[in-house]
Image: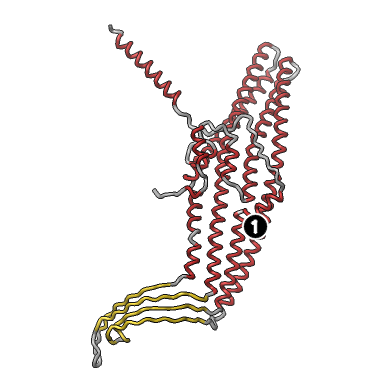
Amino acid sequence: MKSAPFTLFFIAAVFASLTVSVFIQIKPVFSLNLIGAYKHALKYDHGYKAAFYAKKASGIYGAEGLSLFLPQISASVGVSRYDFLSPPPLYFSFTSRTEGISLTQPIIDFKRYFEYAQYGAKQAMGSDEFSAARQDFITRVAEIYLDVLAAENYLKYLKVQKKAVHEQYKQAKELFKAGSGTKTDVYEALARYYSVESDIVEAKNSLKNASAKFKGVVGLSAKGIDAFKKGADFLIPVREKLGYWIGLAEKNNPDLKYYENNSIYRGEAVKKDWSMNLPTLAFTAGYSTTNTQEVVQTPALRYYTVGFQLSVPIFDGGYSVEKSIKSENISEETNQELERERGKIIRKLTASYLRLKGYTARINMLKLAVKSAGIVLKADRLGFASGTNTMSDVLSAMQKLYDMKTKLLKAQYEYLMVFLALKSGAGVLSASDLYRINKLLENKNKNYKFKLQAGNLNYDNYNYKKN
């Protein structure tokens, strides 16, 4: 009977451990793919949200420009007290009241026409800035995601390499004890082991930095993000020639369009400044009521006024002429900046196109190099076992194999970033390009994947609200 409490305690402990074990097993695994990271970043990244609000603000320029042609209506009320100290006959102290409403409708005002065109150019420039920010945002999300995966894969390679080197080290020790190996082989393997250990420490730090950048943009931990499928083909077919991409950039590149609209803005400024020398015509109307004529109280007077106001500038000290000359120089400066930017964009686009073609060939060659290095390592291991090769030969072959694997990994990730750079340079980068990369991922969470694909990724769907 004394053992009964101990028995109950033992049963309860076993039940609790089983419960915890089952809970751990059925706990859902967090999984986040590239599109999921993109959608989270849309709501979290402050840089993108700042660009979003700047775009909304620039959309007001159209209404501001239109207001230049609408009537200007104003109302006024005036109350004053007249207290005479030594008034002449018939002058009495009184309270003056004046009320009125006036309307002015511009009819001919060339300055307003050109200013309206400037507002339109500014609105277009705001859209261009947002398009550039959005493409930069898409590139940043892809880059931080791929950086994490690259860092994780590199760390995995190093751990596998560490395990293989450790096996070689144990084998060298056994052969040395058996008298068929040398002490040099043991130390070479040990030195290589510690070298890989130091690489692992550096790789862990790189992974931490990449994960921190990921969280800073997406707002979530990078732990558990979907990796690429085994044997995924990183090469996205790009069959169009360079001229096709340059043509796209001429029409769609947001930076180039910004400079083009800025050139329009400056050109309209020249016209606006010259129009300061032209006459203006406006329709005017008003209604007033007052009980004051100069400083004398009168019965309430009510009257309407209707007419036209013509203003003819004659001489302003040369201000308008000098301002126009200044505007012409600024406009020409803007035109030169436009051509400079056009050349810069075409050069960058050409570089991206050639790099993409180069990486395609490089990836194919590195795949063959990895295969060849694996065959060499296998042969060197057999040779070492038979005594025809040294431990140095095996370790050198092993190092070459993992170097080739690392180079292939780096080339594959860089290929995807150059592909995005090409689309961005042409001005046609969109979330659909992230979908193309996302198809290469494992996409473990099927339900989450379905929800993401069912949604629209246009920025208009996100109405940010202040907390």
Task: Measuring from the top left, give residue 79's x and y in whole percent.
Answer: 29, 77
Disc 1 crowd, CA 10 A, few/some/many (<14, 14-19, 20+): some
Q: Which residue sits furthest right?
A: 388
Whole-percent x, y for residue 64 in the image: 48, 65
Asked if 212 appears above or below 295 in the picture, the reply is above
At horizontal 53% and vertical 69% (from top left) the residue drawn is 115
Q: Is residue 135 above or below residue 375?
A: below
Front-most of 11 and 430? 430
Secondary structure under the numbered disc 1 in the rendered image? helix
| Residue 150 in sight in this render | no
Taking the image as shown, residue 84 lies to the left or right of residue 323, namely left
Residue at the image point whose x is 68% and y is 40% from the top: 237
Direction top: furthest residue: 1
Q: Quadrant of residue 254?
A: bottom right
- Pick whichever, 182 or 165, lies toward us: 165
Q: How many marks?
A: 1
Q: Which quarter of the rendered picture does the N terminus lie within?
A: top left
Position of residue 449 relative to residue 59, above or below, is above
Q: Is residue 126 visible?
A: yes
User: Which residue is tagged 1?
Assistant: 341
Q: Does 190 sit above or below residue 435?
A: above
Name which residue type carries label 1.
Glu
Where is residue 453 drawn, in percent x and y?
A: 52, 39
The foreground one among 403 and 466 is 466
Quarter of the view holding residue 230: top right
Towards the viewer: 160 or 424? 424
- Colouring scheme, one of rainbow, by chain, secondary structure, one colour: secondary structure
> x, y (%) of residue 172?
66, 17
Question: Which residue is located at x 54 percent, y 71 percent?
Answer: 113
Residue at image location 68% in from the left, 31% down from the top: 404
